[in-house]
Image (spheres, rainbow, N blue to C red):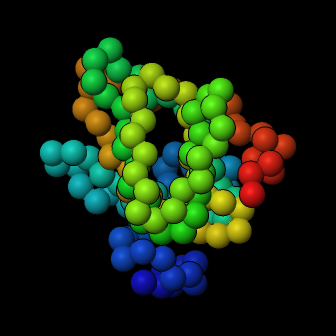
Amino acid sequence: MIDERIGVELSDFAVGDVNPASQWFSGETYLAVLTNEQVPAFNVTFAPGCRNNWHIHHATKGGGQMLICVFGRGWYQEWGKPARELHAGDVVNIPANVKHWHGAAADGWFQHIGLEIEGEDGWNEWLEPVSDEEYAKLV
C-alpha cells in the first residue's frame, strides 16, 4: 500500500507514526504497534540509509528479538561478524545479550516486523551509532 505521508508503496502492514526511539536511529523511521498481546509485534519502517544504533536486548534467561522482513532490502550485523543482507521473507533470530544493528539498504525503503521474545530481567541497551564509513562499505 502507498503511505500518503511518504508517497512510497510499502508492505500491507501499517507504517505507524514517527518512531518514538528515533534518537537511536540514523535517519527517518516509523513504528506501528501490531499487537502487545501474547508476543509483542511491531512493524518498523526504515527510510533509505536509515539504521538503528548498535544495541543489545539483555535478559538473564530467554529473551532476544526476532525480525521478519516484509519489504525491501536491508542489513543485519552482529558485533565482530560480517553484515547479512536482508530481503522480504528473511527471518533473523537474535539471541539475548548479542550486540547488533539492523536497517535499510542505502537505495530503498525497508520494513521488518520486530518480535520481542519474552525473557527474565529484560531490557534494551542502546549504544553507539553505526559509523557512516562502516555503513558505506555495504553494497
Q: Is residue 4 above or below residue 138?
A: below
Q: Is residue 65 above or below residue 85?
A: above
**Left-right relation of 72 to 11:** right
Q: Is residue 17 above or below residue 35?
A: below
Give x and y (percent) for residue 43. 39, 59
Q: Residue furthest top?
A: 60
Give x and y (percent) for residue 34. 28, 60
Residue at 36% x, 71% y is 13
Q: Residue furthest right?
A: 133
Name which quarter of the figure residue 90 lies in: bottom left
Give x and y (percent) for residue 51. 63, 50
Residue at 39% x, 26% y is 96
Give x and y (percent) for residue 46. 57, 60
Do we see residue 18 in this rendering?
no
Q: Which of the pair 84/14 is nearer the observer?
A: 84
**Left-right relation of 82 to 59:** right
Name which quarter of the figure residue 113 lies in: bottom left
Name which quarter of the figure residue 100 lies in: top right
Q: Residue furthest left?
A: 38
Q: Quadrant of the N terminus?
A: bottom left
**Left-right relation of 51 to 87:** right
Residue at 26% x, 47% y is 40
Q: Quadrant of the C terminus?
A: bottom right
Residue at 33% x, 46% y is 115
Numbered label tally:
0
Do we see residue 75 in this rendering?
yes
Q: Which of the pair 129/68 is nearer the observer?
A: 68
**Left-right relation of 4 to 80:** left
Q: Is residue 73 above or below residue 96?
A: below
